Image (spheres, rainbow, N blue to C red):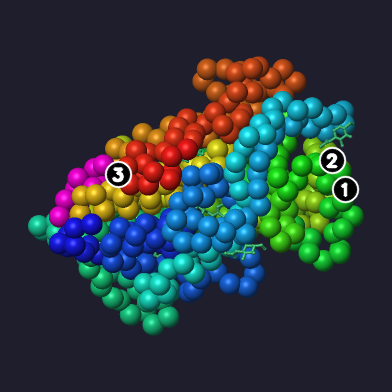
Amino acid sequence: MEGAKKKGKAVVVGGSIAGLSCAHALIAAGWEVVVIEKSSGPPTGTPTGAGLGLDPLSQRLIESWLGHPNLLHNSTLPLTIDQNLVTDGENKMNWTLTRDENFNYRAAHWADLHSLLYNGLPPNIFLWGHLYLSFCVSNDKSNVRLKAKILQTSEIIEIVGELLIAADGCLSSIRRNFLPELKLRYSGYCAWRGLLDFSDDGHLEAILGLRRVYPDLGKCLYFCLGYGTHSVLYELLNNKINWIWYVNQPEPELKGNSVTMKVSSDMIKKMHEDAEKVWVPELARIMKETKEPFINVIYDCDPLEQIFWDNVVLVGDAAHPTTPHGLRSTNMTILDAAVLGKCLEKWGVENLQSALGEFQSTRLPVTSKQVLHSRKMGRIKQGLVLPDRKAFDPKMATPEECHDLQQKNMPFFGQVPSILMQTHASFDC
Ligand SMILES: Cc1cc2nc3c(=O)[nH]c(=O)nc-3n(C[C@H](O)[C@H](O)[C@H](O)COP(=O)(O)OP(=O)(O)OC[C@H]3O[C@@H](n4cnc5c(N)ncnc54)[C@H](O)[C@@H]3O)c2cc1C
Ligand SMILES: *[C@@H]1O[C@H](CO)[C@@H](O)[C@H](O)[C@H]1NC(C)=O
Ligand SMILES: *[C@@H]1O[C@H](CO)[C@@H](O)[C@H](O)[C@H]1NC(C)=O
Ligand SMILES: *[C@@H]1O[C@H](CO)[C@@H](O)[C@H](O)[C@H]1NC(C)=O
């Protein structure tokens, strides 16, 4: 490393997975980092979020940031099998469409991954309880000045850096400055989500029943395909079952700046009744016994044409809102951070435009394809029409459809961007 290079300072807006990953990658690249997050502190106590899948490359990147190879491994469960299983609730039948036993993902709880990444960073770089308000780029474009409000006192502060990283999620307010017209695209369905904690004996029978019908729980990512609907099922560390059930419906009206919907007890009751009709009794029972299930409204966005403007760059969900079917959201996010870090390290703060240009040309073609592929997977699984084919019918699944259903057929699956290989031979797959 040439010590002569000037140290850059980046202001990251958003302290979720994208923001924390960028903090790790930029610190590794020799940058100074400040992270601004509107939540009052790191998530503690009651578990926030649910499950997410990490691919092998994301696992290795996170391990390299944390410095302890076992830390991540110890906080996750394996997902070595990717299986698509049809459930015909009406005729009480089921059959397997695809089963990939070489699937090297691991399942993490959102809050566990967040705290692993958070605990590996110096605490003094975080400004919790700070709401990002606005930014302006200096005339000579050498720096960017950002305004944030301290939520507890309403005091407004200014922070200056060479680079502003928008890691503020799929509803990014920083993105709105450049793309005021951009709207998220409703997928046509919402997801009921829940996390059953079976640490206490209260759910013993339900869990035994579930393991009987889904014997590979604990290492398998189950996609349960119904008619015009599907569910996802997998186990998380510390006695948790993560389930998601996608239901086609008109776009609901959302209140506030969130894609999570408050649900009434009537809605939950109706969901329980419907589950009895669609799924095996053992899965319906898990859904019934889960406390506080919630609804995520599923959106994505047509790929953007650019993801940086002067010294402002979008990463994570801000750069590529996606449906969850390809398990991409977090993987794309972690890769964004790693590639951004390497580009900044390679070009230095003096050549920020080249660094951001290389970041964009490395990431945008990949994330664009992956978002569109995930959209297609979702539409197949939900039995929604696609421009080039009939709505999917599990009873008459074509080889092409079975191909597209499998995670491993995601474009760029298993490919490592060359900028990561140049510096880390160990990332070679
Ligand atoms: C609490 C929480 C729980 C989640 N749980 C899951 C899960 O269980 N499974 C899953 O697959 N995905 C989950 N996600 C989403 C997942 O983190 C993302 O899909 C993906 O990892 C990319 O993350 P991101 O950091 O780009 O976006 P996000 O995770 O959406 O993070 C954006 C962050 O920016 C902050 N922010 C936004 N606007 C401002 C502002 N004006 N000022 C300051 N801060 C701002 C938000 O508070 C948030 O922390 C969760 C996200 C959150 C925030
Ligand atoms: C991971 O778990 C193993 C076995 O329980 C333990 O020996 C090891 O110390 C743990 N490693 C870390 C880094 O937590
Ligand atoms: C699938 O069908 C078999 C045979 O009827 C049954 O034993 C098994 O529990 C079913 N599994 C699921 C997940 O529906
Ligand atoms: C993770 O995503 C990136 C692109 O977003 C891709 O290049 C890489 O191959 C993915 N890894 C796997 C194992 O899917």
SS at mark 3?
Answer: helix
- The quadrant holding residue 293 is bottom right
SS at mark 1?
Answer: helix
**Residue nearest the observer in this picture, 202 or 407:** 407
Q: Position of residue 161 (x, y in %)?
A: 23, 65
Tags 3 and 2 touching, CB below 8 Å: no
What mark, if any, has residue 359 been given in the picture?
A: 3
Tags 2 and 1 touching, CB below 8 Å: yes
What mark, if any, has residue 3 been given in the picture?
A: none
22 sits to left or right of 189 = left
Ligand 2 is found in which quarter of the picture? bottom right
Image: 389 above or below 202: above
91 sits to left or right of 47 = right
Q: Position of residue 151 (x, y in %)?
A: 41, 76
Tell me the magenta residue range.
349-359
Q: Amino acid at mark 1?
A: Gly
Image: 183 above or below 130: above
Answer whether residue 321 is visible to the viewer in this image: no
Q: Is mark 2 within 8 Å of ligand 3?
A: yes
236 sits to left or right of 198 = left
SS at mark 2?
Answer: helix
Task: Quote the CA–CA distance across marks 3 and 2.
Answer: 45 Å
Residue identified by numbered label 2: 213
Q: Quadrant of the N terminus?
A: bottom left
**Residue nearest the observer in this picture, 329 or 66:** 66
Residue identified by numbered label 1: 209
Q: Main secondary structure of the magenta part?
A: helix
Whichever of callouts 3 and 2 sits on the residue coming sooner in the sequence is 2
What residue sits 52% from the left and 35% below the top? 374
